Image (tube, helix red, strand yellow):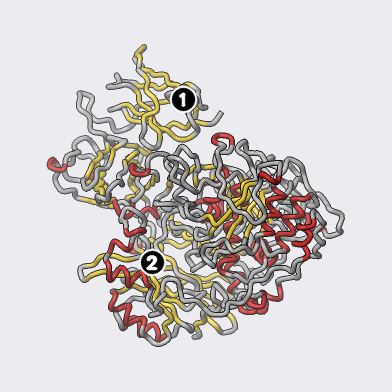
């Protein structure tokens, strides 16, 4: 058997166009010459001079610099050495355990244990595997694209591994946190939940290092201003900028000047530029929950929209960007010039690409800048506005991810404008094929730059502006990983690998290219698919391996792209051994049925298999991968862990926890059996304990506005419990409640709260819900708090198992009235809370005809209609209801 590993590095050594040789002859041949480029028309003498300049190309690197985390070049990650010498606190950002953990390192009885990547100069051999395991270091994963093994070990073991023949270096495994999970996962960039596999980040894709993005928008509130400290996700990332909001050029930023503008528009702009910047390159701040696509990139802040949200200086700003395309910004030598321009704005009129802004945007592409523009939000047909209409500008429409990571439920966003572009009369039908791509544009979470905030807030906005920002982030990541790619090549690989099956697509028109359709362009951007095409053009490509469990079955969905000669795709499975995969064996296979072309109307084949889970494998983790054999060479894809379903659940426990350091600050579990109360001293040991899983297993997560010290990230878990011992404890009652125990680890200034706890018994006659409480329940630093289901109450009625509170209408429009009803005498007033656990309303009950009713209007304390979202109403002893408030 021959085991082959890709030899293409993610970042080619040479930086000229000819480094495309490193990407394989087939890819190089498929990069067609640019379309016939029209000469940029003269705008002014200084602009014409720029147009006559030679197209900028990156110069080859003269000397390879050392790896950033191995400056002493001893082949061991400097972070590992620093933590070994200076202590565990250095594993956290700014040596502060309140912030995010930087690398994978844990404390064991014998000392620190580090998660590492062992990187080799040549393909990994059996001898390499044996040499590593002989040191006591397990092989946890074997990468496909690069000759890399994942392992773990003590510092002494790492020193020994670095000394092995053929090892280039031992690198620390970085910790990934939930981020723009619907958007970033949807485009294949990253997914900490593991549902989308593989991903760009998971397979070593770049994070935007060495790339500068010019963001032409309303200004970005990255820097401190008065009491505003600057936004945590963007502060320190601006390398330069300009202001083009004045009609008089003398009042705008000079050609060689630089400023860092800001956005004072308040509700008029809603900090649009800050939100867009966060999608492209925000680092997510302390929680990392809303991390952008290229979080190591830098930006140039070019203000073209004034504080009323309008502007007329886009053409001037583009001209300034072209002039400064190779500028030394005076900071890190790696962050020079402009590599990407983002234009999350558009004109109210359609364009054929010949207006000044569109032509300048096209000229910027000629000058080696990737330019991305939004296509507009009016839902118009045959309508492409400027500057997105420019030739070779990537025009981007929006899709709705339905707030999920996987692509299967993505739908077209009805507000997105539809092509084709108006004809320009050049007889080239291809340049009218716009939009080019779609990307997430509905309810996207990103930085909130309100100057009245604490600089650590995030908000959800919708529009093709957000979609364009995703594509700009993808372009920045690609140019960081593959510096030799020209804008034309970046565009071609993104278009060729876009994800095309989408729901709710309106009728449209085909184009000259069989892969293009007027509402969706070439499809939804897929960053991992682009990586496959750049690194594996000569063999069959596994685009996704999705695994889903239900009751006693596992459904595997395999998505392939190019199929080059494999007769079958083989699903392989391995038992888990010491936290990693053991020996793989074939589990199932499907015959290959796709083709080798990406140029036709379809660039993906889908294979679905369903496997029954035997009783002895329920709840057991296994590792899965896909293998192929082509030309007698065996290829093994990356492996992923998946826990087999537990079988049909007899109960489900739902818990929502708001906490910004959930994974390394909280210890939470459901305790069942024994006697239980809300006081530890009144409780006998539980018979059964079910720990809450890590945040990666959350079924939902959301950003909650408020002080970061009391928690901004709400994690919702649904823990299914299989048949067995737990059945004897069902249903829970006042004498034997199911208790939720939450211990806060004691990190200073990081507490949270429980906002929902309930036990759902799947009884023979139908589900019964037992609400837990008290909620909201604040966690306490260094202490343990408890909630119980059903809620313990004192009185003749005893505990209430099933909520007796009813509400209607539900949903209710903001400002509308809701009537709540109870069949028993209420113990207190009705209280309404938001998802952060803050009280937003209260109403008294009045009784008549044996029914008690309370009327409440969905308004805030100032009398304004409540914002749309989820709320919950509660009456002590009578349960709670979830209430949906809709925008009017």
Secondary structure at badge 2 equals strand
**Is 522 displayed left or right of 171 in the figure?**
right
**Which residue corresponds to mark 2?**
622
Q: Residue at x 40, y 65 (%)?
A: 174
From the top left corner, tell me how far across and down residue 774 is, in percent: 27, 35
Q: Is residue 190 visible?
A: yes
Which of these two is toward me, 172 or 841? 172
Q: Residue at x 36, y 81 (%)?
A: 162
**Which residue corresponds to mark 1?**
858
Q: Residue at x 55, y 83 (%)?
A: 633
Give the answer, above or below, for where 406 lies relative to 141.
Answer: above
Please tell me which of labels 2 and 1 falls first in the chain.
2
Which of these two is toward me, 849 or 10? 10
Q: How much space separates mark 2 and mark 1, taking CA atoms?
A: 48 Å
**Is 113 displayed left or right of 316 in the figure?**
left
Which of these two is toward me, 391 or 527? 391
Q: Is residue 527 visible?
A: no
Which of these two is toward me, 439 or 748? 748
Q: Residue at x 32, y 53 (%)?
A: 98
Closer to the camera: disc 2 or disc 1? 1
Give the answer, above or below, for where 219 lies relative to 47.
Answer: above
Query: In what quadrant of the picture does the C terminus appear?
Result: top right
């Amino acid at each position: 058997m021959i085991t082959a590993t890709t030899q293409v590095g993610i970042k080619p050594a040479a930086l000229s166009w000819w480094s495309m040789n490193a990407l394989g002859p087939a890819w190089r041949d498929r990069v067609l010459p640019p379309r016939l480029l029209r000469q940029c028309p003269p705008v002014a003498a200084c602009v014409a001079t720029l147009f006559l300049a030679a197209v900028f190309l990156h110069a080859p690197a003269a000397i390879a610099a050392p790896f950033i985390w191995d400056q002493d070049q001893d082949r061991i990650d400097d972070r590992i050495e620093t933590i070994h010498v200076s202590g565990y606190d250095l594993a956290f950002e700014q040596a502060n355990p309140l912030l995010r953990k930087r690398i994978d390192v844990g404390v064991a009885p014998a000392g620190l244990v580090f998660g590492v990547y062992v990187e080799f100069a040549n393909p990994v051999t059996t001898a390499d595997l044996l040499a590593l395991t002989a040191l006591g270091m397990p092989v946890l994963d074997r990468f496909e694209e690069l000759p890399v093994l994942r392992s773990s070990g003590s510092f002494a073991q790492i020193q020994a591994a670095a000394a092995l023949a053929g090892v280039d270096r031992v690198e620390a495994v970085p910790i990934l946190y939930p981020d723009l999970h619907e958007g970033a996962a949807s485009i294949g960039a990253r997914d900490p939940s593991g549902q989308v596999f593989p991903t760009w980040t998971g397979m070593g894709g770049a994070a935007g290092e060495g790339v500068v993005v010019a963001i032409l928008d309303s200004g970005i509130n990255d820097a401190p201003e008065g009491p505003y400290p600057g936004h945590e996700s963007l502060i320190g990332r601006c390398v330069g900028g300009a202001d083009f909001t004045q009609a008089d050029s003398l009042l705008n930023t000079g050609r060689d000047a630089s400023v860092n503008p800001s956005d004072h528009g308040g509700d008029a702009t809603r900090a649009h530029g800050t939100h867009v910047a966060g999608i492209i390159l925000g680092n997510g701040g302390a929680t990392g929950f809303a991390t952008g696509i290229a979080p190591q990139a830098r930006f140039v802040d070019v203000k073209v929209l004034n504080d009323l949200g309008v502007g007329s200086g886009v053409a001037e700003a583009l001209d300034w960007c072209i002039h400064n395309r190779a500028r030394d910004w005076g900071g890190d030598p790696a962050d020079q010039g402009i590599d990407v321009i983002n234009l999350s704005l558009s004109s109210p009129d359609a364009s054929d690409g010949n207006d000044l802004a569109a032509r300048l945007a096209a000229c910027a592409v000629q000058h080696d800048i990737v330019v991305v523009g939004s296509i507009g939000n009016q839902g118009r047909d045959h309508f492409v506005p400027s500057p997105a209409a420019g030739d070779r500008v990537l025009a981007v429409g929006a899709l709705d991810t339905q707030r999920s990571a996987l692509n299967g439920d993505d739908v077209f966003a009805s507000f997105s404008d539809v092509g084709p572009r108006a004809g320009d009369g050049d007889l080239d039908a291809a340049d009218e094929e716009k939009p080019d791509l779609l990307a997430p544009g509905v309810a996207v979470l990103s930085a909130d730059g309100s100057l009245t905030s604490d600089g650590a807030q995030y908000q959800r906005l919708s529009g093709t502006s957000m979609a364009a920002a995703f594509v700009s982030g993808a372009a920045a990541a690609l140019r960081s990983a593959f510096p030799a790619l020209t804008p034309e090549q970046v565009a071609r690989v993104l278009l060729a690998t876009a994800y095309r099956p989408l729901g709710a697509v309106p009728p449209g028109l085909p184009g000259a290219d069989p892969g293009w359709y007027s509402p969706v362009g070439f499809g939804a951007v897929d960053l991992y698919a682009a990586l496959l095409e750049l690194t594996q053009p000569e063999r069959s490509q596994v685009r996704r391996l999705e695994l889903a469990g239900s009751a006693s079955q596992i459904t595997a969905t395999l998505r392939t792209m190019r199929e080059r000669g494999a007769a079958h795709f083989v699903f392989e499975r391995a038992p888990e051994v010491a936290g990693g995969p053991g020996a793989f064996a074939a589990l199932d296979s499907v015959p290959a049925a796709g083709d080798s072309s990406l140029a036709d109307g379809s660039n993906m084949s889908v294979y679905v298999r369903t496997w029954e889970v035997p009783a002895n494998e329920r709840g057991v983790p296994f590792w899965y991968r896909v293998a192929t054999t082509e030309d007698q060479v065996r290829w093994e894809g990356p492996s992923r862990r998946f826990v087999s379903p537990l079988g049909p659940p007899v109960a489900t426990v739902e818990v929502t926890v708001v906490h910004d350091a959930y994974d390394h600050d909280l210890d939470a579990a459901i305790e069942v059996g024994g006697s239980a109360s809300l006081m530890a001293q009144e409780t006998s040991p539980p018979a059964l304990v079910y720990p809450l899983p890590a945040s990666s297993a959350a079924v939902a997560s959301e950003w909650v506005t408020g002080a970061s010290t009391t928690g901004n990230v709400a994690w919702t878990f649904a823990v299914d419990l299989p048949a067995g011992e737990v059945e004897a404890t069902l249903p829970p009652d006042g004498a034997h409640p199911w208790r939720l125990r939450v211990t806060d680890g004691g990190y200073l200034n990081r507490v949270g709260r429980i906002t929902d706890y309930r036990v759902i018994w799947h009884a023979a006659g139908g589900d019964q819900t037992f609400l837990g409480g008290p909620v909201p329940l604040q966690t306490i630093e260094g202490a343990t708090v408890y909630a119980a289901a059903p809620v313990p109450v004192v009185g003749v009625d005893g505990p209430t198992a099933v909520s007796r509170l009813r509400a209607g209408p539900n949903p209710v429009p903001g400002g509308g009235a809701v009537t709540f009803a109870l069949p028993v005498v209420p113990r207190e007033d009705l209280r309404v809370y938001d998802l952060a656990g803050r009280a937003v309303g209260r109403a008294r009950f009045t009784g008549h005809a044996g029914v008690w009713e309370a009327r409440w209007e969905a308004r805030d304390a100032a009398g304004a209609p409540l914002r749309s979202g989820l709320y919950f109403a509660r009456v002590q002893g009578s349960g709670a209801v979830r209430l949906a408030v809709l925008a009017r």
